[in-house]
Image (spheres, rainbow, N blue to C red):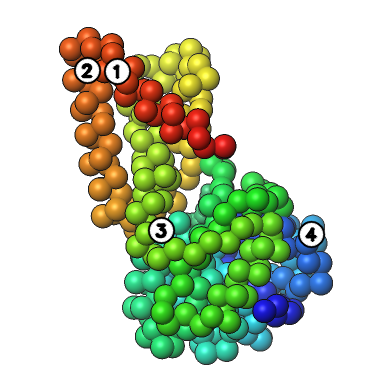
């Protein structure tokens, strides 16, 4: 089923919202793009570069409710946006979000509207990003060939899910569906834990040594592993809290691995260490990225 969408509104024109606008602008120039962002300078620059057609600093300034809306704000801000756009849920063909956690977003929505009233809402998460934030970091090809996970519930209208899938496919992404719970468990292990570890490693090194001195001697491994510690601390502390239980489970599993590593090192058991690293290498070599 293909539905022609003429007007789309992005709330939060940062890295992800701006990248989606740029991808859609290049792939579907006829689509009218409206943005809502609290930073008037961001709106002015997006409008003057032709990225968006209209920009507003508040939901209340819009005269017409858009056909489709994408909420691209930090997960900690989702609820306040849902409150502001509450009347839209009766009229929009589809409303989606891009938040890195899915159960927390659904809980936030459920605190504003009943599941019956929010059938047009399709929870979503593009598995693509960068450590930089804001519109200046947006890229039109950020989602090209990347996965977007949708986590529709039993109350989500299939027509709304189809519209949101179509949107992400236009932006170059491959769309898959998971349950919100499976999404949060998987992303806790593959994204939220690595970010938490990168922040912890860099913090640990800067506390142990003079910060500048240690970075002068940092080799490729450190650069690879620590890159994501440049991500926005407020955004990521919000993500960790929003997926607290699943992240704690992932941390517990990691602690077991670290404990085993420490024990083998204490015993100077090279064979055991090599066997541990071999399992990891075999798994990592299967992964194309
Ligand atoms: P970002 O670049 O900081 O953009 C966030 C946008 O939301 C900005 O326009 C920001 O405006 C606005 N905003 C922040 N707090 C707000 C509030 N309380 N009310 C209204 N607007 C608010 O962040 P991002 O990386 O695009 O992240 C946006 C969403 O994408 C998050 O939910 C994140 O979990 C998800 N995501 C991120 C990545 C990633 O790699 N970064 C990947 C996939 C998904 P101001 O500039 O005025 O603060």
Q: Which residue is mark 4?
A: 26
Q: Visible in this render: residue 261?
A: yes
**Dot in front, 4 or 3:** 3
- Using the rendered image of the protein, determine whether residue 84 is visible from the camera's viewpoint: no
Residue designated by label 2: 264
Sort mark 2 into few (<14), some (14-19) or many (20+) by Cα contacts within 10 Å: some
Count of residue discs:
4
Lateral position of residue 231 relative to residue 32, left or right: left
For the residues bearing labels 2 and 1, Cβ distance under 8 angstroms:
yes
Distance, label 4 to label 1, CA atoms, is 50 Å
Sequence-wise first label, 4 or 3 = 4
Mark pair 4, 3: CA separation: 30 Å
Judged from the image, the secondary structure of the residue bearing numbered disc 4 is helix
Give me the C-alpha separation between circle 3 and circle 1: 32 Å
Q: Which mark is residue 288?
A: none
Residue 106 coordinates in the image, percent (x, y): 39, 71
Q: Residues within 10 Å of mark 3 (few under 14, many from 20)?
A: many
In which quadrant is the C terminus drawn? top right
Tag 1 or tag 2, which sits nearer the N-term? 2
Task: Report the front residue among 201 and 210.
Answer: 201
Q: Tell me the SS state at disc 1.
A: helix
Question: Image check: 143 left or right of 48?
Answer: left
Mark 3 or 1, nearer chain start? 3
Q: CA distance from mark 2 to mark 1?
A: 6 Å
Q: Classify 166 as above or below 160.
A: above
| Mark positioned earlier in the residue sequence (2 or 4) | 4
Identify residue for label 1: 273
Closest to the camera, between mark 2 and mark 4, is 2
Q: Which residue position holds label 3?
A: 183
């Amino acid at each position: 089923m293909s539905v022609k969408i003429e007007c789309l509104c992005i709330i939060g024109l940062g890295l992800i919202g701006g990248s989606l606008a740029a991808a859609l602008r290049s792939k579907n120039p006829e689509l009218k793009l409206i943005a809502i962002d609290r930073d008037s300078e961001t709106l002015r620059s997006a409008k003057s570069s032709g990225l968006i057609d209209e920009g507003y600093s508040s939901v209340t300034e819009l005269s017409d409710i858009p056909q489709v809306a994408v909420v691209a704000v930090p997960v900690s801000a989702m609820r306040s946006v849902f409150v502001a756009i509450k009347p839209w849920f009766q009229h929009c063909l589809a409303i989606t979000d891009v938040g890195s956690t899915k159960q927390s977003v659904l809980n936030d929505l459920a605190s504003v509207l009943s599941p019956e009233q929010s059938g047009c809402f399709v929870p979503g998460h593009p598995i693509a990003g960068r450590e930089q934030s804001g519109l200046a970091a947006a890229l039109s090809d950020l989602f090209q060939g990347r996965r977007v996970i949708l986590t529709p519930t039993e109350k989500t209208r299939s027509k709304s899910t189809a519209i949101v899938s179509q949107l992400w496919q236009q932006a170059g992404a491959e769309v898959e569906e998971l349950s919100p719970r499976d999404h949060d468990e998987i992303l806790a292990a593959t994204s939220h834990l690595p970010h938490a570890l990168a922040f912890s490693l860099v913090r640990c090194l800067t506390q142990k040594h003079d910060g500048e001195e240690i970075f002068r001697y940092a080799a490729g491994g450190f650069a690879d592993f620590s890159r994501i510690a440049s991500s926005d601390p407020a955004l990521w502390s919000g993500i960790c809290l929003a997926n607290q239980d699943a992240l704690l489970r992932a941390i517990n599993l990691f602690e077991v691995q670290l404990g085993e590593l420490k024990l083998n090192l204490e015993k100077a058991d090279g064979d055991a260490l090599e066997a541990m690293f071999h399992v990891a290498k075999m798994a990592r070599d299967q992964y194309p990225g």
